[in-house]
Image (tube, grey):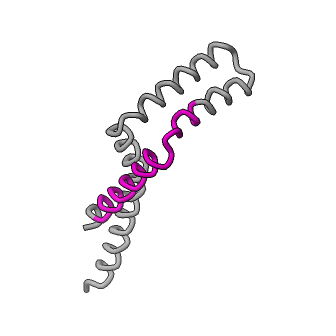
Amino acid sequence: MGILITLVSNFCYVAAREVAYFKFMPGFADKYAAAMVERAKASGEREEKIERATRQAQQFKEMYRKPVVNVALTFAEVFPIGLAVKLVSAAILRKKQAAKTP
């Protein structure tokens, strides 16, 4: 039952995030990628590291434009937390039940 609750809550989170990302923040990937490059330039890195940051920023933009990848990354962002909470709560409840059993 705990896994089902985690999956439903993650589904709601992913759906809300996708709507927000594609409808209300359409330029987020571009802005984030530009910030990545600017951060590399501002840190005084060598040219090859700046070029690598530029390539990574471009890959990030391309990756986030694909809704399937965006959904998978968003799901992977929160599912481990829900799973950990489920496992901890199951362990606590199991200990309480074991203590009650004569």
Q: Residue 53: which quarter of the image?
A: top right
Marks counted in the figure total 0
| 84 vs 25, nearest the viewer | 25
**Residue 3 x %, y %:** 28, 61
What residue is rendered at 37% in x and 72% in y?
A: 92
What residue is rendered at 33% in x and 81% in y?
A: 99
Q: Residue 84: which quarter of the image?
A: bottom left
Q: From what the image shows, is residue 33 above or below residue 101?
A: above
Q: Residue 81: which quarter of the image?
A: bottom left
* Overall secondary structure of the magenta section: helix
Instruction: Work out which quarter of the rendered image holds the C terminus and state it.
Output: bottom left
Q: Which residues are magenta?
A: 5-33
On whether residue 14 falls in the magenta region, the answer is yes
| 26 vs 91, nearest the viewer | 26
What residue is rendered at 60% in x and 16% in y?
A: 51
**Residue 47 x %, y %:** 67, 13
Left or right of 98 in this view: 52:
right
What residue is rendered at 30% in x and 58% in y?
A: 7
Q: From what the image shows, is residue 8 above or below residue 17?
A: below
On whether residue 15 falls in the magenta region, the answer is yes
Q: From what the image shows, is residue 35 above or below residue 84?
A: above
